[in-house]
Image (tube, rainbow, N blue to C red):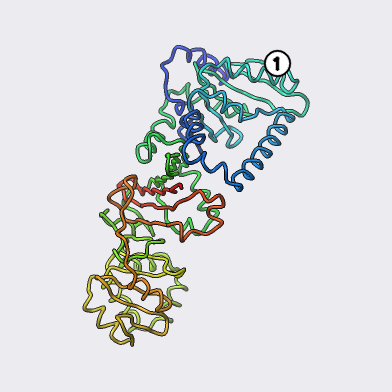
Amino acid sequence: MRTLAGTLGLCLLALGSAAEEPIEGWLPEETLFCLSVENPSRTAARLAGGRYAAVRGDPAAQRLAVEAKAFLAAARETTTARGEVWLGAFWELARGPILLAVVPARDGPAPLVVIDVGEAAAFRGHLARLADTGVLGPEAERDGIRARHGGEGGGAVYWIERGSVVAFSWRETAVVAAARRMRDGSSGLAPRLAAVRGKLRADADAILYLPREALKELEDRSTDVASLSLPDEVALGLAITLDPDALDVRAFLFAPRPRRGVLALLDGPNVELDPPPFLAAEGFLAARVDLRGLPRFARETLDADEARELERLMDRDAGRLATSFLGAVGDRFALAQVGGEQVFLAKVEREAWMRRLLSAFPGEGGVREGPDGAVALRDGWLIAAARADPVRQLLSEPRAPWAATDALPGRRIAVWRLAPEARRTWDDPMRLFAGQEGALVNDPDGLLLVHRVLLR
């Protein structure tokens, strides 16, 4: 019977003549984590030019740069002393994509790095230089897996090569897992990452992928995540792109319909969703959500004791009023920051009913004041706040029409903006941001979130 090592050796010998494939093909389908840096040289060029470079003159940015260099220098010295591979060197060696992954192995999840170095000899040369300093020992090979071990108490590097691609790890079992993936010839992770790019951005500088297995651990640790009732086939993809004038962050939650829990509230159709024309310019969130589904969602998520307590607090009349109110406001709402206070807005479908309800409260100038806040109606929108002043301010000041950036999806179920006046000091210590905006789009395969941090 052939041993696993012998089989791997035969397969690795045949790899040299195999057709080239994306480096994602090195990763098993059940990979637990993957971060893909698409083009390191392009990313470095983007950081070195445009508005990213313009901030270098800022004192806060200079302090941050000094601290970062000191941290990296200390990390490099520590890892070299322990006989480990200095990862930063491979950024310089890379001539193509880099993958940082966690793969399943015999003795538990193991880290794996896959890198297109242009020529595998460059990788071996880097390890040879570490060997010359006494950090690593001589190169050895067993069944197609190469290795360099450190001295007493030192680390070790295991790797396999194929053309211009090298896969390496500090744990041999991770390299064995990659070799087994290539031996089996199955699809691996490549199709999934291709699907992530298709939903996000093909030219992204970096893509992060978390499959269901990784999100399941988040559910086990967080009751908030568990309450989302994520389906079994859920997965998460995240892309970061350094545009000349913005930092573009996109996330896609693979959660195909039909959806359960809170995600079911987002299953309404995408629309050309814009906030009310009178909405405050310094910050808002506008969304189309099935608010009338909230009672059903509450019934599904509350346990028996919580449901009884809710019934005790709300008599029958209050319950009927709440149901009628949700039926009147429809499924579009907005949140705004006005004068540092939060204002809630809802698109009213039954305006006559709402006017009769509001007539029970005193007020002037269209603003009604109750014991718990103030409300008003304008252009078919209900406006509510804890105090009357933000409502009056919102209605009195002229507003410039809001226009979405071309980079944001046109059809969406939510859109938001945070202008410079609304951001907090700790959000932008280097005064780099000119504002933020984003959108949420419903998709048959899940939910797409786009967030753009605009640069000065």
Q: Amino acid at mark 1?
A: Pro
Residue at 45% across, 70% down? 341
Q: In front: 444, or 96?
A: 96
Q: In front: 184, or 140?
A: 140
Q: Determine whether 278 is above or below 103 in the image.
A: below
Residue at 44% across, 53% down? 435
Label 1 residue SS: strand
Q: Residue furthest right?
A: 152
Crowd rating for badge 1 (residues with CA inside 10 Å; few <14, some 14–19, many 20+)? few
Residue at 49% across, 43% down? 213
Residue 326, quarter of picture: bottom left
Percent position of residue 268, x then y: 28, 57
Percent position of residue 15, x then y: 48, 15
Q: Determine whether 342 is above or below 271 in the image.
A: below
In the picture, measured across the screen, residue 86 lies left or right of residue 345, that is: right
Percent position of residue 243, x then y: 42, 39
Residue 278, quarter of picture: bottom left
In the picture, measured across the screen, residue 94 lies left or right of residue 407, that is: right
Q: Which image quarter is the N terminus in?
A: top right
Identify the residue under disc 1.
138
Residue at 51% across, 41% down? 54
Q: In front: 362, or 75?
A: 362
Q: Determine whether 287 is above or below 198 in the image.
A: below
Percent position of residue 337, x then y: 42, 66
Residue 82, quarter of picture: top right
Q: Is residue 236 visible?
A: no
Q: Is residue 425 visible?
A: yes
